[in-house]
Amino acid sequence: CDIILGVCEMCKMRQFGRYKPLGIIEVSLFKNNVLAVAVIIAFFSFVTINILHFHLFRVDCSFTKYGWWNDFYNLINNILIGLLISYVIYLLVGYLPERKKIDLIRSNLIKQYLEFKKSIISILLRSVKLRDSDSLVKDLCDMQKFKKYFNERGKDKWYMILNAVDGNSAVIKEIMIELAVFRNELLFVLNNVSIDDTEVFSFLKRFSVIIYRLERDDLESSDFKSLMRFIW
């Protein structure tokens, strides 16, 4: 009964929705297998013991006529009711609000990721004075179309962008701002959602180093190549 909410492919910045996602945002209806088994056993035990006690479905059990049965029934029935009510309260107070919160975070992150791609593409197009219409920018958000457009044989648009961005502090600053905004979105997710993925944290660490160097205007040749390879 796990609800797995894949966020998007950000760990390696490949095509949206493919490859390994940025961790997995997971909301589990059952926290673990022990709880799942306990709830299932409690439910079926509650149903069974009441069928026996009230002789439902014409089930006739002679042992329910003994005096010890009523005490046993009251004890077990109260315990089972308590367990089931506690779980219902958990659903209403814990699970459902958490699921709503994660759905909101997921939708916002997807939106911010798309806006991030659009902003970066628009900056790159403007850097070489290429048209950056909304329709073109939207099309280039697709990785395959992006690579095909900038790697079109005979035009070398990507090398034009590399030359235009290299040493252009204004363009680099724009890219830096977009990276910083997007990084803040990722950190917000990691601070508000439990994600067990060492790759994500390693990615954020490398991401932070790039942004730090950009903020200090200390972009060396190797760092610039890494940045552009990262965008590519």
Image: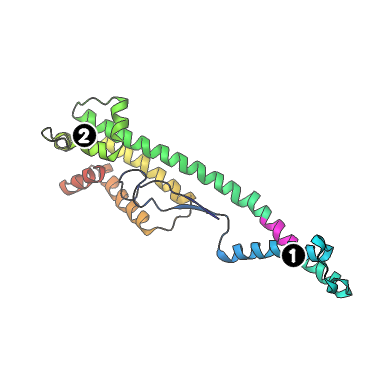
Inspect the image, locate mark 2, and give the three-letter code of the amino acid beneath it. Answer: Tyr
Q: Secondary structure at mark 1?
A: helix
Q: Which mark is residue 149?
A: 2
The three-letter amino acid code for the residue at tag 1 is Thr
Count numbered badges in the picture. Answer: 2
Q: Pick whichever of labels 1 and 2 is earlier in the sequence.
A: 1
Look at 42% across and 46% down and name the residue there: 7
Q: Is residue 145 magenta?
A: no
Corner quadrant of residue 76? bottom right
The residue lying furthest to the left in this view is 154
For label 1, the crowd category at 10 Å Cα-Cα, with few meaning under 14, some 14 to 19 and many 20 or more, is few
Q: Label 1 belongs to which residue?
A: 48
How far from the left and from the top, in percent, is residue 57? 79, 60
Residue 219 visible (yes or no): no
Query: In this rendering, is residue 52 above or below 98?
Result: below
Callout 2: helix, strand or loop? helix
Q: Is residue 65 above or below residue 231?
A: below
Q: Which residues are magenta?
A: 78-87
Proximity of marks 1 and 2: CB atoms separated by less than 8 Å? no
Residue drawn at x 23%, y 30% as measured from the top left: 125
Q: Determine the residue positioned at 10% across, 33% down.
A: 154
Q: Is residue 127 visible?
A: yes
Q: Nearer the viewer, residue 136 or 158?
A: 136
Q: Is residue 168 above or below residue 72?
A: above
Q: Is residue 8 left or right of residue 231?
A: right
Provide the major secondary structure of the magenta segment.
helix
Q: In which quadrant of the rendered image does the C terminus lie?
A: top left
